[in-house]
Structures are given as structure tokens and as C-alpha cells.
Amino acid sequence: MPGRSHSTDAQPLHSEPRYRQLARILADAIAEGEEGEYPPGSQLPSETELLERYAVSRNTVRQAVAELRRMGLAVSQQGKGTYVRQEPEQTHAIKRTLIRKGKRLELGHPGFAKAETVTVTRGHARGIIARLIGRGAIHTLTAERLIIDEDTGVRAAALSVIPFDIADEVPALAERPDAHPEELYAILTAAGHTLSFWENVTARSARPDEQAALGMADTILITHRVTEDQNGRALLVEELRMSAESASLSYRITPTTPKRG
């Protein structure tokens, strides 16, 4: 930038690591906003350009860029480069409430439509899915689909995971593992189960394949909805992954009475 030195040598060294010095210089430039060298949405220089400009090592550049991501100032896209984070104009609230209509349960936000053919696979429950089912590495039927919210354009990856022991008890589940969640709830209810639900929400950095499928996203918001029977046994686990930059989750809270002894 005119009137500003781009060399880290111009900065007092003290005990601050060089990557933090570089991250601070870049952060100061980003803070200038639309009038600065790196306005929101713009691409930062490549690793080679940065190491040549600031006379630092490639490792220092990589650590500095990682620091910018940690600070929430930049987002990297696999194979494309690193961009100054651009705050979305609006974060869309995805309603996670279930609505009871007679004997049927309906999703509070029904706007999601399939964007691709549903893929059904058989395998073992692993990781958090296995923990939520609570019966070890049990065999499962998993239906995976990419969905798009018709109103907002928000994209999400959705999984429905049915444990084999439940599919054996309720053959209609084995016949239609790719059914819409509302239909899965109806099948379980028709089989005599009294359903209850709880959700677990986490977040993590997006993988390259998720960035490609869900749009420019540095952080992925993940919800797991567990459907239980009257005895607290997991009947179904649903997973929803979406960009934390484009969507938030909205819940209606219903007070419950704790079970006695």
C-alpha cells in the first residue's frame, strides 16, 4: 500500500513470532475495509507473493494465514486460494421445531427439497452416530441426500440413519430407508412407538468436499436429531450439515416434566 512498508523488518520484533507479526499486518490491512488493499470478498495474495513481499518463509506465511482464519478474517477454498471473509447480508433461521397434526409429526421448516438422488448404504455405525445410537458399532441403513431450502437457497447435507435392529422390528423402514423424515416418524408411530426427540448441535471446520457441496463455508454447523421410543431407545438418528455463515438454527422450547425414579 502507498505510504506503508510491507516488510516485517519494519515492525518491532520483541518476542512475537514472525507469523503473528505478518498476521497482524494483514489484519490491519483487512480492517481498512472497502477502501483498503483487501476489501471484503477479495482474494489475498498467494503464498509465493506473500513470502516474496514480506521476506519470510513459506511456513511463516501458512501460519499467518491460519491465524487470519482463526481470527475469523479469512476463509480458504481448496484449489482456489484464501479470501477476506465477507459477512452475509442475512443469516437464515432454519426452524427445527416439530409440529403435531393429529397423529402426524411435521417439520417446522418444510422448505428443503432434494437436490440430488438419495443414496442408501449399509454399514456400521461409527463415531458420534454410534454414540448417539448407544448400541456400539451396530449395522445401519443410511440414506444421504443434498437438499436446498426453496426460500433461501441454503444448501445442506442430510443423513437418516436407521439401526438394523429397528429395521428388523419395523420392516417398512427397511423397505423405505430413503423416505422423508416425516414419513419415517409416521412409520415408527404406526408400529406402536411413542416418539420423543432430542438434538445435539456442534460445529467444526469445513472439509474441502463440504465447501464444494455447501458453498463457500469455513465453518460447518452440524445437528443430530435422535428419535427415541418410550423406553429411551434410539430408533433413528438424523444428521444435518450446513454452512454456519449462511444459516442459524431456531427452536421452540417446550417445558417437560422429569421422570420420577
Image (tube, grey):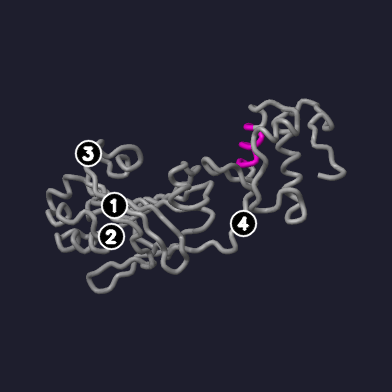
| Left or right: 128 in relation to 67 | left
Residue 76: % across, % down: 57, 43
Q: Element under label 3? A: loop
* In the rendered image, the vertical position of residue 7 relative to residue 154, given as above or below: above
Give the residue at mark 1.
Answer: 160
| First of labels 1, 2 by sequence position | 1
Q: Amino acid at mark 3?
A: Ile
Question: Horizontally, is 235 left or right of 224 in the view?
Answer: left
Q: Amino acid at mark 1?
A: Ser
| Residue 21 falls in image quadrant | top right
In the image, what residue occupies the spot 69% across and 35% down? 49
Secondary element at tag 1: strand
Report if the CB atoms under discs 1 and 2 are less than 8 Å apart. Answer: yes
Secondary structure at badge 4 equals: loop
Q: Earlier in the sequence, mark 1 or mark 4?
A: 4
Amino acid at circle 2? Pro
Judge by depth and name the residue closer to the eye, 187 or 41: 41
> CA gap, disc 1 to disc 4?
31 Å
Residue 138 — which label? 3
Per the model, the C-alpha gap separating discs 1 and 3 is 15 Å
* Residue mark closest to the camera, 1 vs 3: 1
For the residue marked with disc 4, what is the amino acid? Glu
- Tag 4 residue: 87
Residue 36: image x %, image y %?
76, 51
> Which stretch appears magenta?
62-70
Place of residue 171 in the rendered image (x, y in percent of width and height, measured from the top left) = 12, 54
